[in-house]
Amino acid sequence: MKKVIGVLAAAASVTVLSVGATAGTLDDIRAKGFLQCGVSTGVPGFGFTDDAGNWQGFDPAVCQAVAAAVFGDSSKVKYTPTTGKTRFEALKSGEIDMLARNTTWTFSRDVDLGLTFVGVNYYDGQGFIGRKSLGISSAKELDGASICIQTGTTTELNLADYFRINGISYEPVPIETNEEARTNYVADRCDVYTTDASGLAATRSTFEDPDAHVIFPEIISKEPLGPLVRQGDDQWADVVRWTLNVMINAEEYGVSSANVDELRGGSDNPEINRMLGSEGNLNEMIGLDKDWAYNIIKQVGNYGEVFERFLGVNTPIGLERGLNALYTDGGLLYAPPMR
Amino acid sequence: MADATYQPGQHPDLPPPPSTTGVVGWVRNNLLSSPLNIFLTVVSGLLVYFVATSVYEWGFANADFSGASRQDCTSGGACWALINVRFGQFIYGFYPEAQRWRVNLAFVGLVVALWPLLFDNVPARKQLLWYAGAYPIIAFVLLLGGFGLESVETAKFGGFLLTMVIGVTGIAVSLPLGIVLALGRRSDMLFIRTICIGFIEFIRGVPLITLLFVASTLLSFFLPPGTTFNLLLRVLIMVTLFSSAYLAEVVRGGLQAIPVGQREAAESLGLGYWRTMYLIILPQALKISIPGIVNSFIGLFKDTTLVAIIGLLDPLGIGRAALADTKWQGLSSEVYVFVAVLFFIFSFGMSRYSLYLEKKLEVGHAS
């Protein structure tokens, strides 16, 4: 009996100790020497493996930027592929340090699940794609259409809402994955396919004749996607939040991986100087190296560069900036100042 | 030819008419024996022809086998360039390229270890059996590192390597576990019987995918935060437990088919419980259970693809991540066909082996 109590006491003290240890995620990450980052198992442009087996894409780029800020080396990331069903548990249980996996920021996920969204790195919304030959130019004319829809997602609920509000009817064709949807749509088993607009653009890029298909202008939902961390460690949340903000601010101030070496020595813009560390002590406030912002921009790039690399008009996905342009260009990207 | 004369009853046997023997006879008897059969033969012949030619044209004649992206596939058929470029990923996952020889060696080692286990006319079988007993340790060191080998994390395991690790471990561990459970379920001891029944019924009553979710998400809540209990190990445990419950029921079916006289005869010879089981009951029971056991194994092997749902990248997961690369988007048919062929080779091999084993152990009970 004494033995049992001893074991229990030991277990309890280990638990207490390790709870104490998780108070500083940043220190933990420094101690283990790498960032454990949750990514998707494959979303075109947002997360995929390249031919050499490395994770690439718009979301892994955020992980790489955080690693650059913390370690000065964007390659110090280990990726954990997560699915829609395992992502939040992986984060909450401490298996991963942050999650960058096109996850929609919603009230219940932020408040109820014990997670902290640190920002938005892609403003998405649900849209429709259909054949030009249907002769339809708006989603409101879709009365009676058959619609391919991924089951068990928010898109399904959005769709039902939208058609109810507009008083029109539709015939759902339930499917499981994006690939399946693509195949069904191409085989003409549904008139239109609905999912997030970024996904529609990516899907359209694989069609034999992309110009024969049109993405309708209606966006029927708000899907702000962004990276998130566990609730309760504000220092760590700040690191991830301001890594994202540095990327956005860098684009606004015209700092890119090409000219950051030059600007690092000092410039006429005090905002840039504070960000890159030639003025002020922002890095001490957040507890990172003096070159943290420089490393992010140098090794990963500013927001615009990353966008153009994985999603932009020169990639097969070919997304316009749209809502994801800077506020100065009519978009929604607006990061607080570096001061 | 002059007609020879024979005494009545002395005429030598004539060969059967040519139209009833050989290929012609077989075709007439089996394919063209009635108007309906002629019709069905023609229809299915055409069907086979069209399917085969279109598969051939898509998969071979019009296919591209090399290229750096989908744009290089211009022939209109399958684009095997994706498989070609990513073959290493499909087989080894993210295992470091310089270390892949270790996986190959482990696979060769597995074949050598299985050889004396699966066949009995093997030279130096006794030594090889010792080696087979030590193989799990050898494979563990080879795959994970140690003894001078660079260590590789299980997070790097993927593709077919992951399938093999889960499948082979699951099969190897669940068979003895299943036999023990089956014996326990038929035990006279109330406590053991209750535990075994409870375990089997619980595991059989829960879908594998639920157990995998428990392994991937719930378990980490029970453990103190910060402790990392390897995800692959958790999955291995769950898959093995799942498979052993099913095997226990298959083996129990075999045990029940053995007449009670066998046991009574063994006892009257003075054999104890374990020797009765080992020498008399189990050899007969397992022999009857072979088709069921192999069936479970094949099922387990294919069920390993479910791990894709909890974020482990088996060949299907690797395929999905590859398809998200805009260079290769839209080539899902190629990926699925390739993975299907891989799985078919192994599953078909297992079923052929079970047929061989049934024939070898045939003692005349079966009709």
Image (cartoon, grey):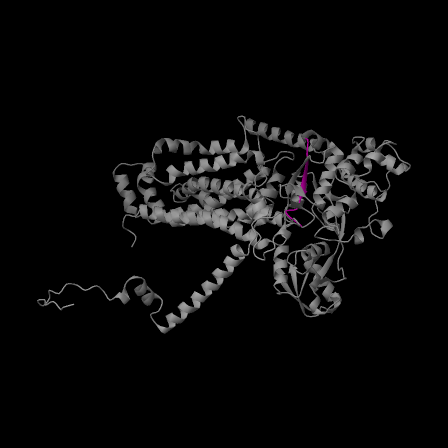
Q: Which of B19 and B139 is in front in this view?
A: B19
Q: Judge by depth and name the residue closer to the eye, A177 or B278.
A: A177
Which residue range is magenta in the image?
Answer: A33-43
Q: Is residue A36 magenta?
A: yes
- The spot of residue B46 in percent (x, y) is 45, 66
- In the rendered image, the vertical position of residue B349 relative to residue A210, given as above or below: above
Q: Nearer the viewer, residue A187 or A4?
A: A187
Quarter holding the N terminus of chain B is: bottom left
* Residue placed furthest toward the right: A268
Query: Is residue A291 in the magenta section?
Result: no
Q: Is residue B113 left or right of residue B153?
A: left
Does residue A183 lie above or below B151 as drawn? below
Q: Measured from the top left, where is residue A149 in percent x and y?
A: 65, 60
In this rendering, would B7 be left or right of A212?
left
Is residue B182 shown left or right of residue B232?
left
Note whether residue A230 is visible.
no
User: Which image quarter holds the C terminus of chain B?
Assistant: bottom left
Say which quarter of the image contains residue A257.
top right
Residue B38 drawn at (x, y percent): 38, 70
- Judged from this view, the residue extending furthest toward the front is B1
> How far across and how far down the image is residue A288, in percent?
78, 32
Left or right of residue B75: residue A22: right
Residue drawn at the location 73% of the way across and 53% of the way down: A318
Q: Is residue B147 visible?
A: yes
The residue positioned farthest toward the bottom in the image shown: B35
Quarter of the view holding residue A282:
top right
